[in-house]
Image (tube, grey):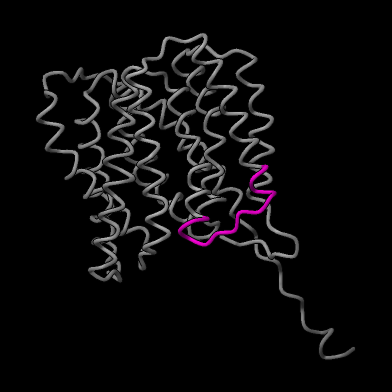
Amino acid sequence: MSAASSIAAPRARFNTLPLLIALFCLLWSYAFVAGKIGVTDCPPLILLAARFSLAGVLILGISWLRSDKWDLTWRDAAVFAVIGVANNALYLGLGYTGLKTVSAGLGALIVSANPVFTAMLAAMFLGESMTLRKVIGLVLGIVGVAFIVWHRIKVGSDSPHGILFTLASLASIVAGTILFKLLAPKGSLWIGNGIQNIAGGLAVMPFAFTLSSVSDIVPSMRLAGAFAFLVLGGSILAYLLWFHLLKVCGATAASAYHFLMPPLGMLFAYLVLGEHVEFRDLLGIVPVALGIYLVTRPAAGAAPKLA
């Protein structure tokens, strides 16, 4: 027996990326439902100011208790703060204001257009390739989402005012995604997420207590449950997964998973809130799923990335 053959072949590493993607999609899509529940009993900006502040304190507090090494430069900390204003304060501030008058399903649906604009801007500013396969995949995603949007608006009673706020929310997360990849902050994503939340909370707080009143809060168990999910599952875990996916998948591929939010968001809205969903809504899932596959499929000969 040769020496080479006596050496055991190394085991292939288990690829956790699909599991992380699935968890991210479930958390992100359910957050629209939790947000809808939250803004029913609490003014949106007060809810967000409390959510961001508590999440930031928890993250940085846990880091301090664990004696985590602070490996961020002042430049990295400033970049995370700027991204926190875009991805937290603006994206969710505008989005939650829109959720007051639009359904959770439609809110998830509009934000799912994120991949289209992200892919175009990533090709312009980040040098990410825009192949014919990706173009076809993005077009299919647009067709699927547009089909669902058209049908939802036709049968629903969503406010145009709320839709405008949700569109502005979409622009904010696209900007935040491009900024994260363009400025490429180094260091711990965990600590960076804490800085983002603190920055988002500080940005929202003046508007929260100027434009709304604490007396408008209706204490309830459903508000407490929604708030707990938004802090732990949304601001902490989902955002940590999001920035991890941006690093390992690229802006275009990671953003393409937002095409999954409309069907998942509508499913959760139906199960939890009783929002109306018809079979024709679900037909849009087919081109959406195919579009995601085309946008995120590795090029021939490329090795899969491991989490």
Q: Nearer the viewer, residue 43 or 234?
A: 43
Q: What x and y, as percent, mark residue 7?
A: 77, 83
- In this view, which residue lies farthest toward the right? 1
Count of numbered marks: 0
Q: Is residue 185 visible?
A: yes
| In the image, residue 298 lies in the stretch drawn in magenta | no
Residue 130, quarter of picture: bottom right
Q: What x and y, as percent, mark residue 306?
A: 60, 62
- In this view, which residue lies farthest toward the bottom? 3
**Magenta residues, dominant SS class:** helix
Q: Nearer the viewer, residue 241 or 206?
A: 206
Q: Is residue 101 left or right of residue 46?
A: right
Q: Which residue does the image show at 68% across and 42% down from the upper left?
A: 136
Q: Is residue 220 left or right of residue 13?
A: left
Which stretch is magenta?
123-136
Q: Which residue does the image show at 30% across and 71% down from the upper left?
A: 71
| In the image, residue 131 lies in the stretch drawn in magenta | yes
Residue 283, quarter of picture: top right
Q: What x and y, as percent, mark residue 150?
A: 54, 18
Q: Is residue 176 above or below residue 230?
A: below
Q: Is residue 137 above or below residue 106?
A: below
Q: Quadrant of the C terminus?
A: bottom right
Q: Quadrant of the N terminus?
A: bottom right
Q: Is residue 67 above or below residue 104?
A: below
- In this view, which residue lies farthest toward the front? 124
Residue 168, quarter of picture: top left
Q: Is residue 57 visible?
A: no
Q: Nearer the viewer, residue 146 or 280?
A: 146
Q: Nearer the viewer, residue 291 or 48?
A: 291
